[in-house]
Amino acid sequence: MQDKVQEPLVGSLVDQRYQVLSKVARGGMATVYLATDLRLDREVALKVLHPHLSMDDSFLDRLGTEAKAAARLSHPHVVGVLDQGEELRDGAQLAYLVMEYVPGHTLRDVLNDQGALTPRLALAYLDAVVDGLAAAHRAGLVHRDIKPENVLIADDGRIKVADFGLARAVTTSTSTGTLIGTVAYLSPELVMGKPSDTRSDIYAVGIMLFELLTGEQPFRGEVPIQVAYQHVNSAVPAPSSVRPGLAPDLDELVRWCTESDPEGRPHDASALLGEIRHIRTSLSDAQLDFGPGTRRGLPAPPAFPPTSALTRPVASARPVDPTDLTEALDPQSRPTELVADRNDAAGQYTEVFDRQVQPTAMLERTPPLTVDTGEAPRIAPRAARSAKKKADKLAARDAARNAATPVATLRKGNTRRKGLIWLVLILLLALLGATAGWFFGMGPGALATVPDLKDKTVSQAQAELSSLGFASTTQNVNDELIAQGNVVSSQPPAQTQQRKFLSVVLLVSQGPTLYPVPAMVGGTLDAAKTALNANHLALGTVTQKYDEQAPAGQVLSQDPAPETQKRAATQINLVVSQGPQPIPVPVVVGQTQDAAVKAITDAGLVPAVAPEQVNDAKVPAGAVVSQTPASGTLTKGGQVTLVISKGPKMVTVPSFVGKQVQQAIDELKKLDLPYKITEVLGGFFGTVRAQDPVNTSVPEGTVINLTVV
């Protein structure tokens, strides 16, 4: 059994700030670690680039630019970028990104665990992902690596898109000589090295929706180049070809997102988000909760029975052409359509005015359109599929109506009365048609295009909407880029066609999310760190300063002031007390008392003279013999005690003349006086003949000279 490889960064400190706790994952560009931000005391995700990228100076420059762009993006469905940096470690360059840590699992884990999802659940996940992408696209960022592995699902249910730290700003060159992304989700233009934009992300979203609905990816191969070839040369199949029974609207949504030509896709995530939310509200509960279907080769689930409807008798009993855009008047489902009878070479049939599509023109019969891929036709364009759906509904209604219509009458009716009834009905239908024509053609029900109102004031946006016939309401949102009071976007998004009687919601910026700066003066530095972390703010520069009143570690001042509103991660600078300033004790031993007292006072200390003076043979009277403390430091107002000298002690010297020299020596020793003996004639008799000084008082230590014979 092989030993488990120890990650070299685990347990180490990166950039003197991030304590690496454990390895989370390893990808094609970087390794992700769980780390603790020691400055803010919080868990973060530390993404360390692989060495071959860390040595690429041009890549690091681009990474720094993209990280700054991503850090400006603040959205509940986007993983925040908190920091970026480089460090020289063991002679090698280490480059890293610091991101918000989201404990939980990925959308890939959901797919691995559950397989295909219900449309309701798949669209719910997709709504959050596209909502986050829409914010990024508005900020000028393209992700370029959308896949289930980069969709994080927190333990509390939050859904976030990760890896925006490696996105590229739309305003810079996005020509990709090197593919960045996972081949299963790469758009055709990325595979062919063409410039990419927001529509490349839309393509990846479409592939991911296919996988959520079916449990498998649309293109597979033994090697990545085979998958990339299919992205360029093949159309993405309809999800219902894998799971029969899925709603046609879901097939249309996947096809729209995965058009080979970027011009055929939604222009950005905001446009796609509106369509997703429309589908979520328009599908029935049965369609949304359609259970995981059978895979290819297995029996299809039973189809739902067609819905019956009240219809008029058709003019002819011929079979319904599924490509005809024809439908009988249905008072319950299509109250705004008019029926007209016409003849053509093939016979008589019924056509319809569709006021929602073309309020003033009669729709002609349209032949089926198919996409030529070299195979059997797979998915018709949107108009033809819509026509087929309508034709199927008409066929079901015709069958129900014909089954309930008697073939013979039991009694003859009044022909004149029938004619009158038919005349009244025709007049009512004409009046209804005229009213509907006005309502949907020129009145409040007419279609109009929602204009682009981004970064306009509310009054300007409301005036522009009013001129087009729209009513409007406002909803406040936080935005990092749009000034407070200006419009961030609208619902529905710009360039969307909508009936005039439907209101437009203006999303108005309140500016970035702001947090109050806590009051920290008077507290400890540790308490200040805790308060800043709780308020989503960062500790800035900490300046140390001596203070005679505040103890060491107490906060003296802060900048900005308390209660100031600041963005998340704003650095707050603090001035912290070092306690009273230490003062060196001056050395005054040997100085006169007055000079010593002045030196100590000038230093900011307090002199104290001991009441008892002492004799000292070396220090003259009135000078300092000793001090306490003799050295070191004191704080302002500290006391220095001085001991003053009385000078040397005086000793009375008796006369030793005529005495034996040994007696004189013994006496001098008792008096603690030194002596010097001079012998005459060898000092034969040992008698002191003379001495100096004699019979007088002398300072201790004075030498007594004795002459001995």
Image (cartoon, helix red, strand yellow):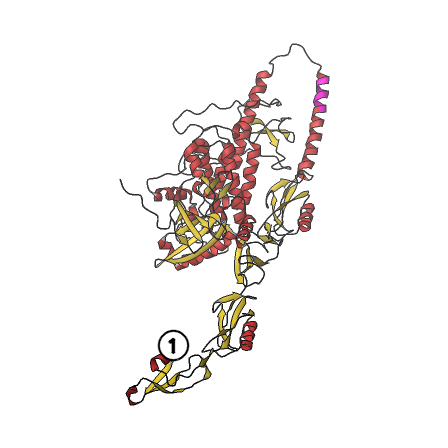
| Secondary structure at numbered mark 1 | helix
Residue 506: % across, % down: 64, 45
Residue 18 in view of the camera: yes
The answer to whether residue 691 is above or below residue 145 is below
The image quarter containing residue 683 is bottom left
The image quarter containing residue 239 is top left
Residue beneath the point at 59% across and 16% down: 404
Disc 1: which residue: 669
In the rendered image, the quadrant that contains the C terminus is bottom left
Please give left or right for residue 608 compared with residue 17 in the image.
right
Which residues are the magenta region? 417-424
The answer to whether residue 137 is above or below residue 213 is below
Q: Determine the residue located farthest toward the bottom in the rendered image.
A: 681
Q: Report the number of discs.
A: 1
The kind of residue on which mark 1 rests is Lys
Pick whichever, 380 or 661, lies toward us. 661
